[in-house]
Amino acid sequence: MKIKKIIIHNFRTIYNAEIDFYGVTSFVGPNGVGKSTVLYALDWFFNGARGTELTSKDATYGHEHEDIEVQVTFSHLSTADKDFLGKYSNSEAKEFTAWKIRKCLTGEEKLSANVKGYSLFSPLKDSALSATELKRLYSNLMENNPKLKLPVAKSKTKILDNLQTWESNHPDQLTLVAENVSTSFNGFNSNAAMASRFTFALVRADFRANEQAEDGKNSLLSSIIERSIDRKSADTALKTAFDDIQDQEQSIYSKVFGASLDNLSDQLNKVVKGYTSNRSISIQPNIQQINPPRTTFSIRVNDGKYQTEVEKQGHGFQRTLLISTLQLLSEQNTQETNGTLCLAIEEPELYQHPTQAKVFASVLRLLAEDPKKEFQVMYATHSQYFLEAKHFDQIYRLVRSNNGKTYQTSFNHATMEDIEDEISPYYHKKIYSALENIYTKQLPIGIFSSEVILTEGSTDKVVLERIAEKIGHSIFNKYGISVIDCGSKSSIIMHYAILHALGIPTIVVFDNDSGWDNRTKNKGDKLEEEKKSHDLVNQQFIKYFGIPTDQVTAGVPNSGIHDVLTSTYMYVVDDTLEPFLLNHCNGWTEAFKSAQKELEISSIKSSEVYAEAISQLSLEQCPKDIIKFIENTISLC
């Protein structure tokens, strides 16, 4: 059983959101947009207990008089899951949906699998109906509503199963049903039936490793113990030992107090017999009933010759212990033994050395993708180490915007199919495999940026960054602008489609290759192939970015800044960067040769040489168009 989708309504910063989940699901965005709110909403759904109820303050601002609701749809139901779900599922159901609602009028919280239902089914769910009457109503329902495609059923049990199956497979058509036909669902927390099939563990940013190292309720150590050790296996031996203690206590009392108590009892009995003749008394020591305590465990740190409590260790080690515990817990989990474990981690990068963070992310990814493990993980993170560009479709970027009345959180997300559908008309080959492999080390950085500039290669990137540094110290960093080297001109569109879908303002810089024929050494057929290649890529850019025909000459986009005429702000470099700098950068040849000599690099394509050459120039010597482009880019932030 795994989370397939959740719908959140009116929970804190999130008023309405529908979120698909994967083996690994990541939530990114600036502070305060609601990344952690998603995890907290699920924690309320799974683990909310009496004494921790929500209040009207947990509703979205301005919507305090509306119900709060979290709906979770599960897929990958195993036979064991369906057995535990009982009447809420059957052998044919592929999904299962449950809701948790806080009613604004009463403050009542209710977790139920059928507090929502299909309105036409309500009359058939009345428990007072006879089998004959139920069959009549079901027959009428099938006849009057053929679009429902309900299967024939001849028994009361089968009819109710058919209704349940239809509702499980059509959660989007369900509404709140009358209270007299709803049934409370024995949910996921504490000792509820489903607790053994699905465990949701929220690791908060302020998670205390020392608390998780004790065998307390819902602690990670407790979860590991329950999956690995039968804590009751010592109960029989302990009971015998405690019984022996009581026998020894009785023996000690008899030796120490026996004669004295017998004498005192005789004296008192002589007095009692003066009032009654048919009863007597005896004075005895009270033998305390001592029951063996529940067996518990704890983690202690072996630090050299000494053992210390976890809380006495540094934050780094405590986080390492926490991560190790989570990893072990994840590795233990299988469908056959322990159901599903879902880890929701707030800021997993906290107190982690970069290498540790990478290893942690890699291990959890492997566990989530292991078909033998029933494991899911979700992050609210600010770290690129917990994102993989090739899994961009498992990332949600949250943005908080003002609708004129209040701030609300929106979710930006793109599936592989969305991106393929968007850009495939501009390519003459299947691009699904290309999208899967569009991995650059910098794309995750771009996902955390306020604005991104895409370039063809590393030389374009360093030129923009070094000129920007001359405009203002760390000015790109100040405004959250990242420059990404896409590796080639043809892959810029793929990067743009992904970043744009995630709601990240994206700017493009590319060469128009207008002078390629003057540089090429190809002849004959190879010359024609090269011409087709340049023409094809330019046509892709013209069509995708909507460059107007009057800004295109002989199939080549005109050089310069394009900001009003296209939907995307861009800069088109005349021909390529090398001749452009030679023609528009005062003193370029001298600076470039000086950089080559200083760095002892002879290559004319080295990004290190380009960076050093720009560093040797003044801002006034740099291309005026590039300076204007960078200044406009900053103003867009």
Image (spheres, rainbow, N blue to C red):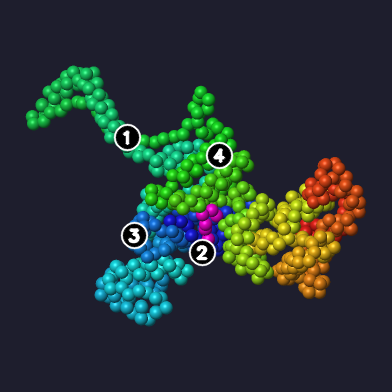
Q: Is residue 495 above or below residue 279?
A: below
Residue 65: image location, x then y, percent: 52, 63
Q: Which residues are magenta?
A: 20-25
Q: Disc 4 designates what residue?
A: 319
Whether residue 332 is in magenta: the answer is: no
Q: Earlier in the sequence, mark 1 or mark 3?
A: 3
Q: Residue at x 29, y 78 (%)?
A: 136
The disc placed on residue 234 is 1
Q: CA distance from mark 3 to mark 4?
A: 40 Å
Label 4 residue SS: helix
Q: Earlier in the sequence, mark 4 or mark 2?
A: 2
Residue 169: image location, x then y, percent: 43, 67
Q: Disc 3 designates what residue?
A: 86
Does the residue at mark 3 contact the one at mark 4 (Cβ under 8 Å)? no
- Identified by mark 1, the residue type is Ala
Q: CA distance from mark 1 to mark 4?
A: 32 Å
Whether residue 24 is in magenta: the answer is: yes
